[in-house]
Amino acid sequence: MRMTRYLPAIQNMIRYSSYAIAVGFCASISASTASTIAVLSNDNQPHWQQVQKAGENQDVYFHAWGGDPQINAYVQWAAKTVDDKYNINLVHVKLSDTSEAVSRVLAEKSANNNDRGSVDLIWINGANFATMSENSLLLKSWANQLPSFKLTDPKNNPAVTLDFGIPTEGMESPWGQASLTFYYDSLAVEKPPITLDELANWTQQNPGRFGYPKPPDFLGISFLKYALVMIHEQNDAKTGTDIRAELNQAVSAQNKEIVLDPLWEFLDKLHPTLWRNGEQFLQSGAQMRRLVDDTELS
């Protein structure tokens, strides 16, 4: 299956990044708490104590994916901590898909509800951040005024200042990192592949035993990013070129082909060896885990 249908998503995030994935949260412009911060942020040097004082005895609705017990437990711990320290009631609104909260904010803005919104904070990924940014749904210039923001090293850390190829402009604050991890069934695979080339060779020898979720699923996009980086890292080492540097640049007619064509070529060879011959794709990480548990995937 050709991947041209996923081209816009890949083009938007074609810059080079490490294999660690920064995740962040955003403040909606329609949130009452966010509006308070906006007022306090008019001063170039806002006093954080004022922000803390303004937040006392308020509810903050944090819309975040609720599909992982460990993450839910962490949010519960954070909620207790901010309650104990700052007398703020942090409410975890559990989402099955972040787009639910994005749609809600969009609907509220369309109804001219700009100061009594139901979404205060959103745990967000790059695609949803791009959507909200393009529709002016996010509060600007708040994240870079957080006391600890300087510890993210924004001058040298593009993952903080860019998301999905779009400048964050203080609309998004990182709150953790995740790493793309490949895992395998040790009863079925004695020596797992540890490089992209080894993975491609392994799937040739073991057709139908490997798969990845269909983009724009987060894991599917992450796999394509990993493949894109590794392909050019290997090619640059062989040819002495520096095409990988283009991954940090905006997409143009000049660099699109030289950057993406090697990825299409790799995927055209890989897909026929995948689960169901690459004619159907896994829909989610949860489905992928079930198939490994059922020994349908290795």
Image: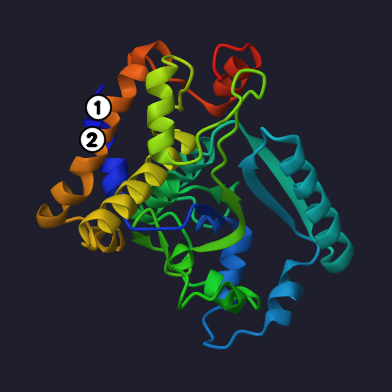
- Quarter of the image for the N terminus: give it: top left
Position of 189 relative to 175 (above/below): above
Q: Which residue is mark 1?
A: 268
Q: Residues within 10 Å of mark 1 (few under 14, many from 20)?
A: some
Position of 250 relative to 112 (above/below): below
Q: Identify the residue at horizontal 56%, vertical 11% (top origin).
A: 296
Q: Which residue is mark 2?
A: 264
Q: Measuring from the top left, give residue 94's x and y in whole percent.
A: 67, 37
Separation (CA) of disc 1 from disc 2: 6 Å
The answer to which quarter of the image holds residue 115 is bottom right
Q: Is residue 242 left or right of residue 22?
A: left
- Depth check: 74 or 277 in front? 277
Q: Amino acid at mark 2?
A: Trp
- Quarter of the image for the C terminus: give it: top right
Q: Is residue 14 visible?
A: no
Q: Measuring from the top left, give residue 88's x and y in whole percent.
A: 79, 60
Q: Identify the residue at horizontal 46%, vertical 76% (top origin).
A: 156
Q: Measuring from the top left, give residue 214's x and y in whole percent.
A: 40, 27
Q: Amino acid at mark 1?
A: Asp
Pointer 1 with pointer 2, Cβ within 8 A: yes
